[in-house]
Image (cartoon, rainbow, N blue to C red):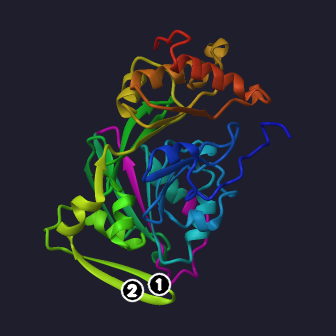
């Protein structure tokens, strides 16, 4: 089977990869398709049953159960290979009482509403599904609009807010964005965990209580700075019997919880290697644990890369070095290199490692 038609099987992201086994990560990232497939990154939130999705290329090979965990979608731009999956996601979510948040560059609201306008919505009375679209503008503002299925996706609420680099602030993480040039505005993203809280497994064993959802509640209380006397209730089943034990936060916080630096992941695709783009990307991806970066061409084809407003593998390696990223994962390879994906990976890795000289932005 050729590499241009191969797709990586979608693996349950709750199972740790070798990378995540080393880093007790809150996020488990995986590219949705193979290196020649449509761009897309699925990021599972290990302990919260949720997921983030970056770009909406072809996603029909992702199991519906995994897609239904997605709460937020971050679109870089709406070229067809980054947005064709919207309809598939819509079909899965439509009849369910769910909320979906979509973020994107200038024009994303019109793009989403244009997709929705292509269908007839006369049988959606009472549907609870709601899409909220957030558009990052060139004017330093984020405009948003709420589109309920029950109103045939006619907006019922809309507004705007300042954009200062963060598009989503969650109690557990934040998503940062920067506007880049792909001959159209294109967004690069980074997701950063605010605080990473680990559980001392040895102390948990001494406590004699198995892990469970109560540990997530404990971590949430620590993150929120809850009072010492906050009740933490551990519940589990033992020999078919429901067991429960009640603690105060102060009894568990120092005994069970260890704080370490939060995890960070960057995702950048479809941009040109320019003096304007490069420093923005380096800042966005500063010291991330893993940097997912497109590399459509090898360096000998750099003229073609510049014409197409894409990166070479050497340029991807350069950006990862500029950002001081811990790991680089390249994707979105041109079909011209079918059967030779390792060529792009080797060039990016060699530049990232300093074995090949870094490139200089135009």
Q: Residue furthest bottom?
A: 241
Q: Is residue 157 magenta?
A: no
User: Chief secondary structure of the magenta span?
Assistant: loop
How far apart are labels 1 and 2 at the CA level? 7 Å
Q: Is residue 236 left or right of residue 357?
A: left
Whether tag 1 and tag 2 are in contact, CB under 8 A, the answer is yes
- Mark 1 falls on what kind of element? strand
Earlier in the chain: of badge 1 and badge 2, it is 1
- Residue at 42 percent across and 24 percent down: it is 277
Instruction: Identify whether 343 is placed above or below 91.
Output: above
Q: Position of residue 280 (x, y in %)?
A: 37, 28
Q: Position of residue 231 (x, y in %)?
A: 21, 77
Q: Position of residue 141 (x, y in %)?
A: 28, 45
Q: Quadrant of residue 212?
A: bottom left
Question: Which residue is labeled 2 in the image?
Answer: 243
Q: What span is colored magenta in the figure?
A: 115-139
Q: Pick the residue in front: 286 or 248.
A: 248
């Amino acid at each position: 089977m050729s590499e241009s038609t191969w797709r990586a099987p979608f693996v349950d992201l709750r199972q740790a990869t070798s990378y995540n086994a080393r880093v007790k990560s809150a996020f488990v990232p995986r590219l949705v398709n193979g290196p020649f497939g449509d761009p897309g990154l699925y990021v599972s939130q290990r302990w919260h049953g949720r997921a983030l999705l970056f770009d909406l290329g072809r996603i029909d090979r992702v199991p519906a159960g995994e897609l239904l965990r997605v709460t937020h979608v971050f679109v870089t731009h709406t070229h067809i290979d980054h947005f064709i999956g919207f309809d598939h996601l819509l079909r899965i979510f439509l009849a369910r009482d769910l909320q979906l948040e979509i973020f994107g560059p200038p024009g994303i609201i019109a793009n989403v509403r244009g997709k929705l306008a292509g269908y007839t919505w006369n049988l959606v009375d009472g549907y609870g599904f709601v899409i909220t679209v957030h558009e990052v503008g060139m004017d330093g503002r984020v405009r948003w609009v709420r589109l309920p299925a029950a109103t045939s996706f006619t907006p019922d609420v809309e507004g705007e807010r300042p954009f200062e680099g963060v598009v989503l602030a969650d109690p557990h993480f934040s998503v940062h964005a920067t506007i880049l040039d792909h001959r159209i505005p294109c967004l690069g993203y980074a997701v950063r965990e605010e605080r990473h809280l680990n559980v001392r497994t040895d102390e948990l064993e001494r406590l004699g209580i198995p892990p469970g959802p109560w540990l997530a509640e404990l971590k949430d209380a620590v993150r929120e700075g809850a009072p010492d006397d906050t009740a933490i209730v551990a519940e589990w089943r033992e020999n078919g019997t429901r067991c429960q034990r009640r603690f105060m936060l102060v009894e568990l916080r120092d005994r069970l919880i260890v704080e370490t630096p939060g995890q960070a992941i960057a995702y950048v695709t479809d941009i040109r290697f320019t003096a304007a783009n490069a420093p923005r990307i380096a800042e966005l991806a500063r010291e991330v644990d893993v940097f997912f970066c497109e590399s459509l061409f090898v360096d000998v084809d750099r003229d073609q890369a510049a014409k197409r407003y894409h990166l070479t593998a050497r340029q991807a390696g350069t950006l990862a070095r500029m950002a001081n990223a811990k790991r680089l994962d390249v994707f979105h390879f041109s079909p011209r290199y079918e059967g030779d994906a390792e060529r792009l990976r080797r060039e990016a890795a060699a530049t990232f490692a300093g074995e090949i000289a870094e490139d200089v932005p135009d």
